[in-house]
Image (spheres, grey):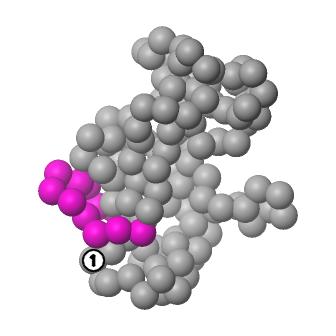
Amino acid sequence: MITLTEKAAVELRSLLANKGASGSSGLRLAVRRGGCAGWQYEMAVAEPEDGDVTVESFGARVIVAGDSVERLSGCEIDYSDALSDAGFKIHNPHAARSCGCGTSFETADDPPAANAVADGEACGSV
């Protein structure tokens, strides 16, 4: 399923505490059609919904949307505190190509999105 680095778990626990999230809340992760590479990640602090899969690691909870499990299986969530690129980062083994901002991706099985940018290129550069 999904793995969470220890650094990401520390940041996620802090985020949930700062948001006053309930004990069953977590970082809900989904993918939807869109973005500059065909699929875009959606992340929100939320409660699990019917059909979701919950993963707990290092005391932090990630909730994977039921309709996104296949595209997110095997992903690793990390956290970067770099000055210009801080935030949760998803390393997706299914991504054949992704945009420069890291918020959208394309799989090898998907036809290229009409507004796709070159692999690693910044969004909006087409």
| Residue 85 in sight from this viewpoint | yes
Between 78 and 58, the one lying in front of the other is: 78
Looking at the image, the residue that sits furthest to the right is 83
Location of residue 118 in the rendering, given as x and y in whole percent from the top left corner: 72, 20
In percent of width and height, residue 2 lies at: 41, 51
Which secondary structure, mark 1? loop
Query: Which x, y percent locates residue 82?
Result: 80, 62
The total number of labels drawn is 1
Query: Label 1 sits on what residue type?
Result: Ser
Image point (32%, 84%), residue name: 22
Asked whether residue 93 appears in the rendered view, the answer is no
Residue 104 position (above or below residue 106): below
Label 1, on which residue? 24
* Residue furthest left in the image: 50
Query: What's drawn in magenta, residue-wise?
Result: 45-57
Left or right, 7 with reference to 69:
right
Q: Position of residue 65 (x, y in %)?
A: 30, 50
Identified at 75% across, 66% down, the residue is 81
45 relative position to 24: left or right: right
User: What residue lies at 33% left-to-right and 53% top-to-bottom?
Assistant: 64
Q: Is residue 69 magenta?
A: no
- Is 55 in the magenta? yes
- Residue at 75 percent of width and 21 percent of height: 126
104 relative to 60 in the view: left or right = right
**Above or below — where is 110 with respect to 56?**
above
Q: Is residue 79 above or below residue 115?
A: below
Q: Residues within 10 Å of mark 1 (few under 14, many from 20)?
A: few
